[in-house]
Image (tube, rainbow, N blue to C red):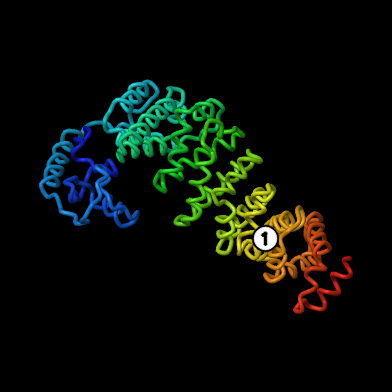
């Protein structure tokens, strides 16, 4: 089927409209797309013009709907005998197909077709990479990102998102592919998708990063990691998608594993400790373990320990995971508490919170159950060093008091 006229495409989804409606600025959109813009994302502007709207009334555009229907009838009859792109896509045609993707004004549709042709077809994916497909996607994303940044063009950014979905469909398991994705033409738009993309686009972008990370390559060179971390923390704070939050934790773990000192301190500065602590109470096992691992890494720097100590719920949230979530969570939680209470002189508030939240009782319980030697050693040291402080509480149980004397 021939490409539809631009007028028939929704400026938001860049797909052919089925139920076109017009907003007060005179721009027509697909009803589902503009309703999502208004009511799901809470926007108050016209996506195409960015004008603030005084009314959210949607007027059905019956004329345009009729014209689109007539065009579909004619296009369907004229293409009924044509061969779909997927059946024709082969290595000999790929250069012209890729040139067409770069040249067409209907890039979103072209990219969707290209992705549908390659999904699940390993040979087609290999041919795509061999024929320069990753470089084409990089140029398309870079151009779309530039157009979007220059004029606030929503449809241009939609092109960037669709190109990212094609890139995410590739295995990216060989050195050649990874090297190409690491180039600025690809990597900067991928990071921009994590920061500004839709939920689906963010998932695709983080999937790309995960594949590169598995190849043991440092993708952070030339990337504004601080801004990226801030965006990932916003994803975790929103909590709208468990899958998105899970991917965001994976990327944060990769970033912190590759960084030390200043970069971790920057993460603390933009609120990482606060976000991770507030993630713990409702977290499942996998989320809790990864959040605790991140807290452990951040608490190795002075800024992280200070932020942890100043958060009213930090100690109780971490202590609550001991002997409750998993063996790994218990080990990580004890390490976090050890870092803030033994690695440096702790504030009295931290020790108060450990006792009042039941953390001290859990440390004693850890010594009675099967756990790693290093975890038991940390728990015992916490109790030896601060036992005298905790024994001063009138409500301190007698049996625990006797056990602390035994430890000392």
Q: How many marks?
A: 1
Residue marked by disc 1: 326
Q: Relative to residue 117, is residue 64 drawn left or right?
A: left
Measuring 15% from the left and 42% from the top, which residue is drawn there? 68
Q: Is residue 204 above or below residue 57?
A: above
Measuring 22% from the left and 45% from the top, which residue is drawn there? 17
**Nearest the eye: 108 or 301:** 301
Residue 204 x, y percent position in the rendering? 45, 42
Q: Relative to residue 254, is residue 197 drawn left or right?
A: left
Q: Relative to residue 344, is residue 36 drawn left or right?
A: left
Q: Is residue 188 above or below residue 93?
A: below
Measuring 13% from the left and 37% from the top, which residue is drawn there? 74
Identify the image quadrant of the N terminus.
Answer: top left
Q: Quadrant of residue 113?
A: top left
Q: Quadrant of residue 259?
A: top right
Residue 149 x, y percent position in the rendering? 36, 35
**Nearest the eye: 200 or 306:** 306
Residue 73 x, y percent position in the rendering? 14, 41
Measuring 69% from the left and 71% from the top, which residue is drawn there? 356
Residue 72 x, y percent position in the rendering? 17, 40
Q: Is residue 255 above or below residue 81?
A: below
Identify the image quadrant of the C terminus.
Answer: bottom right
């Amino acid at each position: 089927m021939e490409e539809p006229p631009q007028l028939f495409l929704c400026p938001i989804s860049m797909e052919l409209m089925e139920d076109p409606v017009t907003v007060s600025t005179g721009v027509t959109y697909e009803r589902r797309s503009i309703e999502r813009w208004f009511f799901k994302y809470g926007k108050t502007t016209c996506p195409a013009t960015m004008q603030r709207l005084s009314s959210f009334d949607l007027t059905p555009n019956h004329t345009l709907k009729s014209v689109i229907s007539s065009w579909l009838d004619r296009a369907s009859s004229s293409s009924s005998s044509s061969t779909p792109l997927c059946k024709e896509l082969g290595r000999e045609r790929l250069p012209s197909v890729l040139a067409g993707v770069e040249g067409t004004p209907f890039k979103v549709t072209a990219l969707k077709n290209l992705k549908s042709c390659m999904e699940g077809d390993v040979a087609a994916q290999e041919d795509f990479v061999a024929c320069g497909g990753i470089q084409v996607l990089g140029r398309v994303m870079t151009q779309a990102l530039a157009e979007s940044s220059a004029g606030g063009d929503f449809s241009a950014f939609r092109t960037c998102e669709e190109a990212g979905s094609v890139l995410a469909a590739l295995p990216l398991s060989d050195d050649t592919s990874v090297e190409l994705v690491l180039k600025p033409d690809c990597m900067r738009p991928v990071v921009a998708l994590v920061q500004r993309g839709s939920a689906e686009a963010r998932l695709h972008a983080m999937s790309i990063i995960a594949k590169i990370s598995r190849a043991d390559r440092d993708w952070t060179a030339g990337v504004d990691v601080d801004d990226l971390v801030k965006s990932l923390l916003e994803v975790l704070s929103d909590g709208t998608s468990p899958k998105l939050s899970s991917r965001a934790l994976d990327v944060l773990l990769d970033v912190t594993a590759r960084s030390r000192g200043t970069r971790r301190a920057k993460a603390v500065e933009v609120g990482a400790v606060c976000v991770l602590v507030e993630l713990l109470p409702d977290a499942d096992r996998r989320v809790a373990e990864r959040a605790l691992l991140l807290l452990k890494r951040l608490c190795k720097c002075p800024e992280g320990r200070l932020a942890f100590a100043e958060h009213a719920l930090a100690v109780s949230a971490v202590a609550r995971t001991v002997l409750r979530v998993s063996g790994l969570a218990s080990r990580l939680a004890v390490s976090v508490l050890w870092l803030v209470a033994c690695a440096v002189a702790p504030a009295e508030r931290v020790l108060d919170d450990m006792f009042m939240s039941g953390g001290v009782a859990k440390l004693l319980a850890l010594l009675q159950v099967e756990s790693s030697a290093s975890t038991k050693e940390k728990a015992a040291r916490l109790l030896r060093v601060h036992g005298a402080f905790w024994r001063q509480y009138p409500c301190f149980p007698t049996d625990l008091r006797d056990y602390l004397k035994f430890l000392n």
